[in-house]
């Protein structure tokens, strides 16, 4: 329920506060006083878009706050989904700066406009006279019937199944498309794979071959260098090792004369051992560096093969060639297993189709059941509103293919004249009939208390007299099950309300401003008299107003 609305710096409203109560409230006032502006501000705080043109003072930000009392604990799920703390007293706040920056808050937590709109739409339903055209929209008709049938949980189950059904259909289509591709493509992939498999590629072999070829191609130079190194160590007149032998013998004699020379002699001995090891390794390398023409040819052919394969597949790295082989193997295996995958997916789709049909059948049964009761109630109310021969029906027709909402097409049918067959509402109902039908429908829906606050913006436009009185009576009854706020120009409707608010313009000062106040019983009689006599309160109008108000 909407408890409080505070508006600052919005169009012709500088600062306005209003407290609302349970039951049926009306808002009246002269044309242009700000009734629609009040609803615009409420829509703004519920997530509607707005631009800086709404600023009363272009240098200040606009702030609109709405306080709601939430009694339906089911709303907690919406708050949980938005990661918001649920509280029974909930404050919506919306700000718009002169720099066109908009911010939205729920209980002081910043939220997106989408979140504000989603939660707000479950708290308030604002209906203008133009919204009656929604009745001709088939999606709206189906949504309305599902509300009456209380299909929320069933629809949720169906939509999950429908998503899975679509996923399986897409998968099957992709698999069949893959299976129907030209077999030559698979043959070509197999040919490429076979060629790479025959090559028996091994990780790291390309670098090893390059290194071996480099050594073999430079074998003579390597052997010459090794021979020279060996000569410098031990196979020449000036070789290092024989001279180290003489140096070691000299230090051996010296240490007997100079004790400190023992350490020097030990260091020379260590160096001599290390150089002997080096000489041994050099000799071994020299022996191993024999050029093997057959081995060289073998490695060169392997190297050429690997290079040809990389060039053929436009690859610069040998590792990429190994990856290509693995990828081709995966693709070929996928082709070979495609029939099994198609069969598996077809089976899963068949099972999902059966489950989805069962859920759609339950939805159909619920809609059929609800449509009969709903149609009868709407027809009865329409007859009260100066349409004595009205017939309202809902056709729930099966469709061939699954849709996002089931296997049904819903059509609202109507006839206003005696003996005339019902036809689609969009083709036969006038604007006035649509408004009265919408009021009848909203009245029936309100009994289910699906939204706690309903606001009518001149839904009663274009009627008068006895019909207006009956509209007021219907709204009065609706106020027993929800909070109903109606903007009206009809005294018959205003007289039926529990609470009466009056919007007026103040032209004092530099700018026109809009204000609102709740009327006491005496003021209400005066306002109803004005509405009856076009602002001239005559004794007859006052008497008629008293009769309306106290009836």
Image (spheres, rainbow, N blue to C red):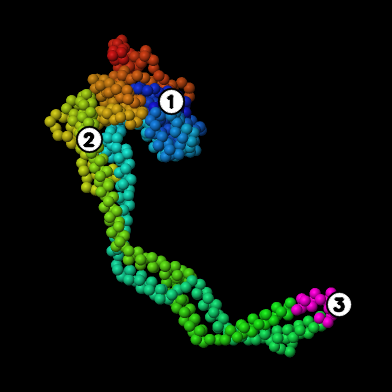
**In this rendering, is residue 66 above or below 522?**
below
Residue found at x 27% / y 21%: 473
Residue range of the region highlighted in magenta in the rendering: 252-269
Identify the residue shown where x is 43% and y is 25%.
4
> Which residue matches tag 1?
4
Q: Nearer the viewer, residue 490 or 327?
A: 327
Q: Please state if 450 lies on the left or on the right of 319 as rendered.
A: left
Structural crowding at the residue carrying mark 2, measured as other residues with C-alpha within 10 Å and reported as few (<14), some (14–19) or many (≥20): few
Depth check, mark 2 against mark 1: the one in front is 2
Most prominent secondary structure in the magenta stretch? helix
**CA neighbours of label 1 inside 10 A, class few (<14), some (14 to 19), many (20+):** some
Please check the rendered image and state whether residue 249 is part of the magenta-colored stretch, yes or no.
no
First along the sequence among labels 3 and 2: 3
* Residue marked by disc 3: 258
The mark nearer the N terminus, 2 or 1, is: 1
| Mark closer to the observer (3, 2) | 3
Please check the rendered image and state whether residue 258 is part of the magenta-colored stretch, yes or no. Answer: yes
Real-space CA distance between mark 2 and mark 1, rounded to the nearest whole angstrom: 39 Å
Answer above or below: position of 451 versus 178.
above
Q: Quadrant of the C terminus?
A: top left
- Residue shown at the point (37%, 23%) measured from the top left: 22
């Amino acid at each position: 329920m909407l408890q409080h609305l505070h508006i600052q710096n919005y169009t012709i409203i500088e600062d306005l506060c209003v407290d609302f109560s349970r039951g049926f409230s009306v808002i009246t006032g002269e044309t242009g006083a700000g009734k629609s502006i009040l609803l615009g501000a409420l829509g703004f705080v519920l997530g509607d878009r707005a631009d800086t043109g709404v600023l009363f003072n272009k240098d200040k930000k606009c702030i609109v706050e709405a306080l709601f009392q939430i009694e339906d604990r089911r709303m907690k799920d919406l708050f949980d989904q938005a990661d918001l703390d649920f509280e029974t007293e909930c404050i919506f706040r919306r700000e718009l700066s002169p720099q066109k920056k908009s911010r939205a808050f729920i209980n002081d937590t910043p939220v997106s406009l989408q979140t504000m709109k989603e939660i707000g739409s479950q708290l308030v339903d604002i209906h203008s006279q133009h919204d009656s055209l929604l009745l001709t929209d088939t999606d709206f008709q189906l949504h309305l019937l599902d509300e009456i049938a209380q299909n929320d949980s069933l629809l949720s189950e169906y939509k999950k199944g429908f998503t899975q059904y679509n996923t399986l259909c897409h998968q099957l289509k992709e698999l069949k498309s893959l299976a129907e591709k030209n077999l030559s493509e698979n043959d070509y992939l197999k040919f490429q794979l076979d060629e790479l498999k025959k090559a028996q590629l091994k990780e790291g072999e390309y670098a090893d071959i390059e290194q071996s070829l480099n050594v073999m191609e430079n074998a003579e130079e390597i052997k010459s260098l090794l021979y020279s190194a060996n000569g410098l160590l031990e196979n020449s007149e000036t070789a290092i090792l024989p001279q180290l032998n003489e140096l070691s013998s000299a230090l051996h004699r010296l240490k007997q004369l100079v004790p400190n020379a023992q350490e020097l002699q030990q260091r020379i001995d260590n160096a001599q051992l290390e150089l002997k090891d080096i000489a041994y390794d050099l000799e071994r390398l020299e022996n191993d560096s024999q050029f093997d023409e057959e081995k060289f040819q073998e490695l060169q052919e392997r190297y050429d093969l690997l290079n040809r394969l990389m060039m053929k597949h436009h690859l610069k790295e040998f590792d990429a060639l190994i990856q290509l082989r693995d990828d081709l193997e995966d693709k070929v295996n996928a082709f070979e297993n495609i029939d099994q995958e198609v069969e598996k997916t077809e089976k899963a789709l068949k099972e999902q189709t059966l489950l989805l049909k069962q859920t759609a059948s339950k939805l159909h049964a619920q809609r059929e059941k609800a449509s009969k009761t709903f149609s009868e109630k709407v027809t009865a109310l329409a007859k009260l509103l100066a349409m004595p021969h009205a017939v309202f029906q809902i056709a729930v027709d099966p469709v061939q293919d699954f849709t996002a909402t089931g296997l049904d097409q819903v059509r609202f049918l109507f006839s206003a004249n005696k003996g005339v067959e019902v036809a689609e509402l969009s083709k036969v109902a006038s604007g006035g009939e649509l408004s009265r039908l919408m009021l009848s429908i909203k009245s029936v829906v309100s009994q289910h208390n699906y939204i706690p606050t309903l606001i009518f913006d001149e839904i009663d436009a274009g009627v008068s007299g006895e019909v207006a009185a009956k509209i007021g009576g219907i709204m009065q009854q609706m106020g027993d099950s929800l909070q109903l706020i109606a903007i009206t120009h009809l005294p018959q409707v205003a007289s039926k309300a529990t609470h009466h608010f009056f919007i007026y313009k103040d032209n004092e000062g530099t700018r026109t401003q809009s204000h609102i106040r709740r009327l006491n019983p005496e003021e209400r009689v005066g306002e109803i008299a004005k509405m009856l006599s076009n602002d001239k309160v005559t004794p007859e109008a006052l008497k008629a107003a008293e009769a309306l108000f106290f009836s």
